Every structure is written in structure tokens, then in C-alpha cells.
Amino acid sequence: MLGPETPEDLERKKKKEEKAKEKEAKRLKALHKKEASKLQEAQKASNTSKKTEKKNAKRVTEEENSQDFVDPTTPLGEKKQLSPIMAKQYNPNLVEKSWYAWWEQKGFFVADSKSSKPPFVIVLPPPNVTGALHIGHGLTAAIQDTIIRWRRMSGYNTLWVPGMDHAGIATQVVVEKKLMRESKLTRHDIGREKFVSEVWKWKTEYGSTILNQERRLGVSLDWSRECFTMDDPRSKAVTEAFVRLYKENLIKRDYRLVNWDCVLRTAISDIEVDYKDIKERTLINVPGYKDPVEFGVLTSFAYPLEGGSDEIVVATTRVETMLGDIAIAVHPKDARYTKFHGKFAIHPFNGRKLPIICDDILVKMEFGTGAVKITPAHDPNDFEFGNRYRKHYNLEFINIFTDDGKINSHGGSKFEGMPRFKARVAVIEALKAKGLYRGDTSNEMVLGFCSRTQDVIEPMIKPQWFVDCTGMAKDALDAVFDEDNKKIEIIPKQYSAEWKRWLENIRDWCISRQLWWGHQIPAWYVTLEDDELKEFGVYDKNWVVGRNEEEAQVEANDKFAGKTIIQMVRDPDVLDTWFSSGLFPLSVLGWPDNTDDFKAFYPTSVLETGHDILFFWVARMVMLGMKLGGDVPFRKIYLHPMIRDAHGRKMSKSLGNVIDPLEVINGISLEGLHKRLEEGNLDPNELDVAKAGQKKDFPSGIAECGADALRFALVSYTAQSDRINLDIQRVVGYRQWCNKLWNAIRFAMSKLGDNYVPHAAPVLSMPFSCRWILSVLNKAIHKTVSSLDSYEFSDAATAVYSWWQFQLCDIFIEVIKPYFNGDDPKFESERSAARDTLWICLDTGLRLLHPFMPFVTEELWQRLPKTSGSRSNESIMIAKYPSVKEEWTSEEIESEMGLVEAAVKSLRSLRSQLPPSERRPAYALCKSDQIAAIIRGRELEIRTLASVSSLEVLADNDARLAECGVEVVSQHLSVYLQLQGALNAEVELEKLRKKREDLQKQYESLKKKTSASGYKQKVPQNIQDEDVAKLDKLMRELALVEETNRNLESTIAEDR
């Protein structure tokens, strides 16, 4: 290795560079000023409009930027054409153009079922067909695409399947609103067939919006396998699943209590119910009611006993349901009601006899009056109670509501036809008229609302189809917890407890919905000539199931052989959307047919989704996959956090904190954010609150960040296990970091030259800095790969970021600059090695980063010189993912650089007292020959990184140290910087005092730990040895600080 330039040479060159930079800055400033002046004069002369002003400004900009910096127009689907010279600044909008269409056209996303490569498969959680891209989709896309791109580059036959969910309720609501808005018609006005046709039209026109938006995020989905839960193959799978489960007696029809929406006139699933705490009397707007309805009230009234000798008082928050009361419950140990045991109360409006039943499960003596009215057709607890005593007391479950929430004939002629909450008022008035009303009190309660319509949920008994989940749930539980035959791993592990809680307490799953949009249930009701009642659905035994009507007819003929069939009518209900979603890993691969895709790709590799649907979707996929597919549908379950705003609040339109990923990618003004709110359906008060929230959080709108920065930020956030508090400024920071990458490549291109050809260079003969950067690159590769493999995405992102930012850009690129300052022949060898190393680093580093930031890495990688003869050179996304190269690793080199970095950090601290451009001599005081040799050997690196004019190793008593500031680097090393007039001795003494205090605290803390009772018995020997070494190191550093302090005090005394 040739000797470095002298300090004087370097100082001269540095000053020359600075003068050139200052001159260039002045020239550009003058140019801008001149052009701005020209523009102002033109504006005054012609009194131009705003439009003309923009054109003039654009013209000035175009004159300043040569066409050499502008990317030529690329035809859609062709490989992006790059400008001859890189633009001076990173622009996400320009960088992210064209690449996606080319990737897709080249077929890079498509999996091959015949491939010999090991498969790696993910199914994208199918977004609702009604949906628009939100930040949760952005997180899902960022994580899954990171996994898929990494596995694809690592040699796997990757398949990432896109799909769309028909979203039964959500879609029906959207189309019904559209129908009412445009034609003033309901679905009942036009009939089922025409309405379903309207939904299909809407789906064709608007249904693919969200998947097209996903493309903007750069997702490498296999679009050739795109599917829809209502398309023919998926519909076939749904029918097959229903038929098979029915034939195994796992699907049955029964009268059960369901969550009923009176607006939609359908049962809805638990996940579609939003629960709100009502603390006191509260007025709430309910769909279909002109005036608000009061909730949070406990009403008491009396039931007269049979014979009229006494009464029993009950209390309820839903007094209208007393029209369906069939019994009264009391606690067997409640002395107040002992005299009523075995007696009957009489219903005041219909004369029904209500048995008074003792029960210690339902009744809480301290709540209300201690007597509980029983309405099993409209309350979950009463339903369970009714089932316990149904046979003994011959109890009848009486439904008093119509499907649209009005009182039916069972409620009595006086109330029949009244909407339920108007009936509430009427019942109270009727009770008062009979002298049975006993008052009301404020009462805390929980109220369920439909998430789609905001209707208050009505528990209602209805005939529905149910899946018996007991056996399947046990299999799904064992798949996670059976250590001898474990089939699924849940990540993070904490959610395994939730899996256990749900599946151990599983109930039958109601899978029927009273909708028109969805998979119509493949069941037919058979009416027989000898049936006493001919109404539809009266007899449970009269149902038959088949894959089609012909098969159902054969089933009916066999089941009712010898009987006359009058008619066979298909059940008008549809299946719960979660049923078809639960089959998704099977149906997307072609099940029930044994397709090439099913044979090659089932089971899939990992299911990635939010932890909020662990039971509603994930557990059901596992149950159905194991039962119908013969194996678990995936080997791992990764559950990502839920996204909140920067303040930890749930994202809500009414708060104005909802973040649209496309607005982060493209940027948006505050006015644009306000406009989005105005186009929504917020009331005036909510709109004002939302706008104020936006103004506070985004006073200048949201800056254009690009997809890469957003993806990287979202992946980085996954360390927060259950929720992400998303701060847009962090995304902006990663957008700025992309500019750092851009400039690193610009620097490299200027140093590599036009004719550079990559080739393997012998590592051992490389300069110190080159060997170091390759060694730490090895560690970054190992950390990234191991973190991705263990689904620790934040750690993987941090490993890549830290290497690029703190090691490549902050150190390596800076430290090799002296090799390229001119064409000094003595640095020829170093220059050549630095070029080779720089190319290796950038090529490897971009490939390492690509899964996280696909667009900018593709663009920058395409600009690098390429090795010849490989298809993988066509695109970075099919290039090989980096792997550890053992020959690069050198712990000795890294240790030396660690000392260099520590010395540089200390010298930079001392330099902070000087003007930025001023460079002064630095000195090192070493307590060992080994350290002194390292400092002398790395003098160029330290000088370059610390921006000092020279570096010399001195002895303790050298007089030059008296004019220097000092920093203690370690027990073996102190560094000094000549400050001359800038030296403030008192400040230096204070710094040493603080250093001594800090070291003393560390020493005392460790000493206390090692002296604690039981330390020698409990702590492993290797840890004890480490603690002894740490104590020794701290003592040496304290001694060095003390010595430095004495020397400084002595110098001060001499000066006085």
C-alpha cells in the first residue's frame, strides 16, 4: 500500500475544493436571481395570467435542467428508458413510473406449478369489492411483498395470489343506496334477479378499484391467478364445501338467537357488530326514526300474580320485549321471593301465565329488583335459560318482531305494526294506565350497533343454518398446541393464548344471511302432499341439499320415497361471507378439483393478516382447510399490529386522522385533505372537528413520499407488536433517505467511470477500509436474512438501513474520497480496489434492500455496470438475494475500525468548538504500543473522517498538548485537538469532571452487582469473567481521566 498524501497536500486540496464549491454556489445563486428577474419583468410587461406565470416558471426550470437529466418516455409495458445522466435529486414520482408495467409484462410475478424450485405461497387477504385502499391494506401489502420478493430472489417458486371478496352486506348496502339515490327504488321494488344483476354491473364497473390501487404500492402479485369469491370456480368450491359438511352432519338447520339488523333484514356476524358503552341516559339517532331514542334507562314494572293477591316487580332496559315474556326467574336463596316459588304471574296485556322459576345461574340478587323477566326469543341469556327449563315447564319461545323491527301479531293487536322503539313508549304508557309502572333509573349498559347501517342490533330467534365447529375446533387447537405433531406456528406467540381462548369456547357458527347478494344456499325445501302445514320452512326434516337442483331432486326422491312431492323451493338465503373467505386458501388453488396448482402449492406457506380477525377468518380457514383439504392451509400465521395515528388514536373519519396511502405516496395539500372530508358524509359538527384535526396534524398537507418510503416506514413499525402509532414525518424521513441512496449511486457512477467492468477482487489484498465495509456488509446480510426468516421485519429493515446509512454512506464513501482526489499514481492500487468494492457494495446493498423498496432499488441497480451472461441481470427482482461470504468477515478489521470510529467521534466533538471549514492538527496519546500502531496505521482514515489537518501520536509530556482540547476515548487512548485561542480550560475541566462521574457511576453499579449476595453462585462463570473485564476497563479509563485532568490543571497553573 502506497503512503498517504502529506497533511499539507490534503489541506491544500481541501481548501481548493471549498473555494470551487463556494464559487459554484455563487454562480448558481446569480443565475437564479437573473432568471427570476427576467420572469418578473415579463410578468409586468404582459400582465400575464396565473396560467402564463406557471408556464414561464416551468420554462425557466427546463432551461436550467438539461434534457440529459430527463428520462425519455417509455411505452407502457416496456423496460424503462433512463436518462443519460442521473438527476441531481431523487424524485419518487419519476422513479416509480414504468417499472411496474414492465415487471408485470415480463411475467416476473407469475408462479409455475411445474417448477422444480421449492414453493413459497401467500394468499392475499381478499379486500372487500366495495373498498378503497386504506393504510391497513398498505401495511399488509408492504409486509407480504417484502416476504415474497425476498423468497423469489432466494430461489423459491413464489406464488402470491390476489383476490377480491364479494362482501355480501357491504356491497348490498352500497348498491341499495345507489338504487335509491338514482331511481328512488328499493331492492324489493325491482326484485331479486334484477337487483343481483345491478350488483354485478356495479362490481364490473367499480369492483377492481382497490386491486388497481395495490399496484401503486409495487405489489408483485400473480395477477394471472386473480380471483373473486363469487366467480364460478370459487362458487363451485363453496357449494361443494356446504354439501360435504352437510353430509357429515356438520351443517344443520335450527332455531337459534342471532344478531338481527332490522334495516338490512338479515342476521349479521359478531365482527359486524360494534359495541358502545352507554354510561347514563343517552339519546341516540336510530335509522328509520325521526326523533332520537333514549337508552341507558332501567324501567321497573309489576306483574300481578295469579289470583291477584300480590305482584312481582321486574326491571329491564328493553321494556318493549315484555310482550314476548314467557316466565319470571328468581334466585332460590332470595328470601324476598320464597313465597312466590312455584306460582304464576299473569301477563297484563294477553293473559299469558308466566311460571316463576328458581335459577341461580342467570339471576343476580343484587341487580335491579332481583326478579328477571324471561324473553328467550330476544335475549341471549334468556335463550340459555329457556333451553334449561323448556321441557320441564313447556316454555314457548315467542318472537314479537317482524324482520323490519315492527311488533308482529304475537305482540298483541294494541301494539302490532309499531316500530320497536315507538312500541317502547307505548308499552310504558299502557303499563301506567294499568297501574303497573314502577319508575325508571339511569343504567350503565353496552349496546350493539351494525357497523354497516348503525342500526341497533336486535337479538332475534330465527331458523338458520349452523356449522357444528366442535370437532374442527379441536383439530385447529391441536395444530397449534400439540407439541408432538405441531403443524402451525403463530407469530407473535402471544396470540396463541387468544387462539386457545376462542377455540376452547367455540359455539356453532351461523352461516346463513337474509341477503340477495352472495352464494345462495344449496338447500331446497320440499313440500309434501301429506304435510299438515304447507308454509315454506315449517318442517326441519323437509330440507334436502345438493350441488344443483337435479342432485337435490334425486335426494328428495330418495328421502321421501313413496310420498307425493308438491314442490321443491330453494332457500332464498345466502351464505355468510366468512364461509367463502374461510375456503379461500383451498378455492384459489382450484379445490375441490385436484389441480396442478393445488398439488404444487397447498398447503400455503404463511398467512399474514391483522390480529383482529384471528378467529373470524384465520381460525375458520384452519378448520375448513383441515376438514376439506386434508391439511392445515398454512404453516405459519403472522399477525401484524393495528395502525393508529401518531397520537395513538384509532383512525376515524370524524377525527380527520384517516390516512390514505395514495395521499402519502403522491402528496396532498391541506386543502385537498379538507376536500376529501367534505365529499364524505360527516355532519357539520363532525366536519369542523375533523378539519381542525387535519390542520393540527398536517398544517402543510402531506409531502410527496413515494411508495418506497411508505413501505419502508410501515415495515419498520412492525416492532410495535399490537398497534402502530403512525407518524407521517417518519415516512418523510425515509423519503429523504432515498435521496441519500440516490446520491450514493451518483457518487459511484462518477468514480467507476463509463468503461468500468465488474470483476471479483481478492479481498485480502484490499485496503483496510474496503475490507472493513465488506465485513460489516456480511453482518448486515446475516442479520437481515435471519430477521426475515424469523418474521422480525423491523429488525431486518433496521439492519439494511444502518449499513447503508451509517457504514456505507457516512464512513466508507467518505473515507475513500482521498483516493479519487486527482490522479495521484501512489493511490492507483487503492483507487482500483475502492472501485471494485464500491460496485460490490452497491450491487449487494441494492439487492439486500430491494424487497423493502422495489422501485428505487430497481432504478438505481439498472444504472450500475453489470456482469455478463445471466438472465438475472435483466431485473433486480429476479437477481439473487445476497448471502454471507465467509471470506469477507474479519473481526480484527472491524475491531480496528471500531477504534477509528471512536477516535473520530471524539475529535468531531472537539471540532464543534471551531468554525466548520477550519481544520487543525490533532494528536493521540496511547497507553499501549498496539493502539499506537493502529492509530498510526489508520492516520489517513481518521484525518479524513474527523476533518483534521494532521494526526500525530505524542508522548505524555509533549508541550503541544497544552494548547489542546482533550477527549478520553478509552482506557488506552485519548485524543487532542489544537484549539489555541479557542481553548477554554474551564470547559475542558468540566467535560473531564462529567466523564469521571459517568465512569464512576458505571463502576459502582457493576461493583454492587458483583458484590451482591449469591452472585458467585447464581451467575454463570463466563458472565462473571466478563464483569471482571468490564471493571478492569472502567478502572483504567478512570485512571486515564484522572491523569488527563491532572495534566490540564498543571498546564493551567503554569499559564497563570
Image (cartoon, helix red, strand yellow):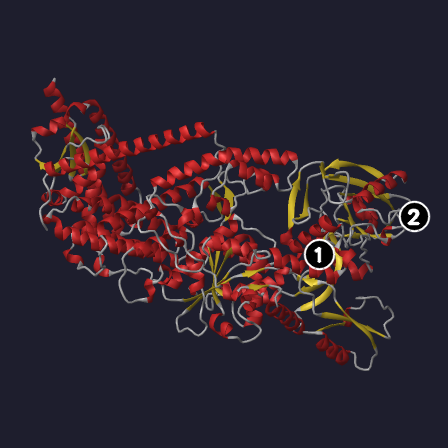
Q: CA distance from mark 2 to mark 1?
A: 41 Å
Q: Is residue 123 above or below residue 290?
A: below
> Reading the chain from its start, which is encountered first: label 2 or label 1?
1
Residue that mark 2 sits on? 307
Residue at point 84%, 66% (across, down): 535
* Location of residue 110 in the rendering, given as x and y in whole percent from the top left corner: 45, 66
Q: As shown in the figure, which amino acid type bears the numbered disc 1?
A: Ala
Look at the numbered disc 1 and give the secondary structure of its residue. strand
* Location of residue 662 in the rendering, given as x and y in whole percent from the top left corner: 50, 47
Left or right of residue 39: residue 1040: left
Look at the numbered disc 2 and give the secondary structure of its residue. loop
Q: Is residue 727 above or below residue 1050?
A: below
In the picture, residue 289 is in which quadrant?
Answer: top right
Which of 576 and 245 lies nearest the eye of the viewer? 576
Residue at the front extreme, as displayed: 46
Task: Rate crowding at label 1 as few (under 14), some (14 to 19) or many (20 or more) other CA atoms within 10 Å.
Answer: many
Residue that mark 1 sits on? 267
* Location of residue 52 in the rendering, given as x and y in whole percent from the top left corner: 47, 35
Q: Is residue 463 visible?
A: no
